[in-house]
Image (cartoon, rainbow, N blue to C red):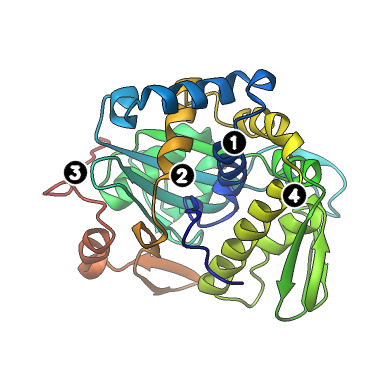
Amino acid sequence: MAKDQKQPLWKKILKGTAYVALCAFAIGAGTILGYVGKSPLIQQIAMQRIQNTPPEEIFREDTVNVLLLGCDEDRAHGGKKILRQYARSDMMLVARLDFKTKQITGVSIPRDTLADLPGYREQKINAYHSIGGKDLAKRAVEKLLGLSIDKVIVLDYQIFQDVVDMVGGVDVFIDKKLKYTDRRGGLFIDLKPGLQHLDGYNAMCFVRYRHGDSDFARQARQKDFLLAMRDAVRKNPVVIGDVANKAAQMLEDDFTIDQIAAIVNFAQKIGSDNIRMGQIPVFDAPNYNLRVDRRNLRKTLEEFDMLDGEPTTVSYN
């Protein structure tokens, strides 16, 4: 799918699904402001644009670090009964919004990466959310990377599906057959290669598929989805207000309306070359786990401008 240099996209604050719904409404809400009456959020977006309010004035910071979590439901064997609505995190991304340099960068954390916190046994990083929710997941990521996290977004996959369905689905090109069944996770992926029109559920399957695939391939699919979502929103502009309100539901616990609006306007001004995403360095560990490559971690964080001078030391004693 061709890269559109004229319409910058907040692509990959999400390396994964998590931030996908936010990007989707950001594209639409920032593009069409004729429907301000439908949404307090869009009213705020319009007001900040008219007043040319810089995002650092809203956040009172030059940078904001955001942890994005996409979480599976925890289901009983067979997949029918939901045991817990949010269990282990399916994806983890730390994104940095730099308002001064006008760039968005981020690094993903493979879910099988081992991490420890005082008072807990060493375990996969994605397990901490199921133990203590997003606050414990935040603490685990801060200790693992040595970075401070300002905000946490937990992706609601149902909202993701609803947003896609609101715009009438998306058209994406699938380069190979994607088939995988995870009954306990309630995920039944069966997508054929070629140009396909996907509804909300199948769009979720498209961006979450990872069976036998690399994180880079998954990343490429998520980028394709974002571009397809942008096109779908443009074809159906009357839903902009509803899409914005729906997507904002998963952000309201950690962001105020004016902060969400500031992010939307900031993202609209970012050139595609100023959006860079990568992955923390890891190596294989026993029992199909991964460990952080400490020798190269700082280099990676510097490469993606995640550090302010010396890395932050986050201690949990």
Q: Which residue is mark 2?
A: 268
Reply above or below: 227 against 46.
below
The amino acid pointed to by label 4 is Lys
The amino acid pointed to by label 1 is Ala
* Residue at x 36%, y 63% (from the top left corner): 280
The disc label shown at residue 29, or none: 1
* Residue at x 51%, y 37% (from the top left corner): 153
- Label located before the other in sequence (4 or 2): 4
As rendered, which of 151 and 80 lies closer to the eye? 151
- Label located before the other in sequence (2 or 3): 2
Reply above or below: 286 against 274.
below
Q: Nearer the viewer, mark 2 or mark 3?
A: 2
* Residue at x 29%, y 59% (from the top left corner): 304
* Residue 269 as seen in the image, left or right of residue 225: left
The disc label shown at residue 312, or none: 3
Reply above or below: 41 against 100.
above
- Label located before the other in sequence (2 or 1): 1
- Label located before the other in sequence (4 or 1): 1
The amino acid pointed to by label 2 is Gln
The amino acid pointed to by label 3 is Thr
The disc label shown at residue 72, or none: none
